[in-house]
Image (tube, rainbow, N blue to C red):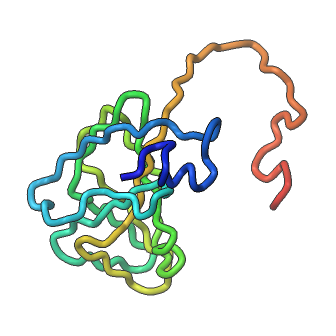
Amino acid sequence: MAVLGGEGDPLREAGMGGGNRPMAPITLRIRRERGAEDLPRPRYQSALAAGMDLYAAVPQPVRMMPAERCLIPTGIRVAIPAGYEGEVRPRSGLALHHGIGMVNTPGTIDADYRGEVRVLLINHGHDPFTITRGMRIAQLVIAPVARAEIVEVDELAETDRGDGGFGHTGGH
């Protein structure tokens, strides 16, 4: 077993030592929904993956027509630690090969949410697409959250950009 910072640590081997060291792993508690015991639990597919895969817990195949949206269950509930959020993101392979994405990207799971994790998929492709049980449908990234204290003021500090937006900085 690789030890963080020690011999065999994939982050160290990738050159991520010292100031680039990510935070220590956190504990993500999950509870499977009844009937989802046969599905893999969320997992990282590589040593340096940011997101862990989520799997479709559909009881039977779901056929998505072009432009159709479907709310797909994952069969799990999560307890995200305070100070963190879960970001549900689309899988790039499904997007590239089939046009399958998410309507709300990223979807946010708050630390106090305890319902089943479900993924709102959309078929942007030209052909019908079938979601099957156990298919990898999205990724879950656990990220720290900064909370803001709101202070109402009469003026904001000026910047070179000002109020330019929606492509104002170039790269149309």
Seen from this angle, which residue lies furthest right? 160
Q: Residue at x 35, y 69 (%)?
A: 136
Seen from this angle, which residue lies furthest bottom? 127
Regarding residue 103, the answer to whether it shows in the image is no
Residue 100 or 142: which is nearer the viewer? 142
Position in image of residue 145 (x %, y %): 49, 32
Position in image of residue 156 (x %, y %): 78, 20
Residue 115 or 64: which is nearer the viewer? 115
Q: How many labels does the image show?
A: 0
- Say above or below: 87 vs 24: below
Q: Quadrant of residue 160?
A: top right
Position in image of residue 4 (x %, y %): 46, 43
Residue 149 or 26: which is nearer the viewer? 26
- Say above or below: 38 vs 25: below
Position in image of residue 87 (x %, y %): 45, 48
Q: Which residue is drawn at 81% across and 36% down?
A: 163
- Say above or below: 117 vs 23: below
Decide if residue 32 is on the left or right side of residue 69: left
Regarding residue 68, the answer to whether it shows in the image is yes
Q: Which residue is drawn at 30% across and 72% down?
A: 135
Q: In which quarter of the image is the C terminus?
A: bottom right
Q: Residue at x 10, y 61 (%)?
A: 35
Seen from this angle, which residue lies furthest left? 34
Residue 120 or 143: which is nearer the viewer? 143
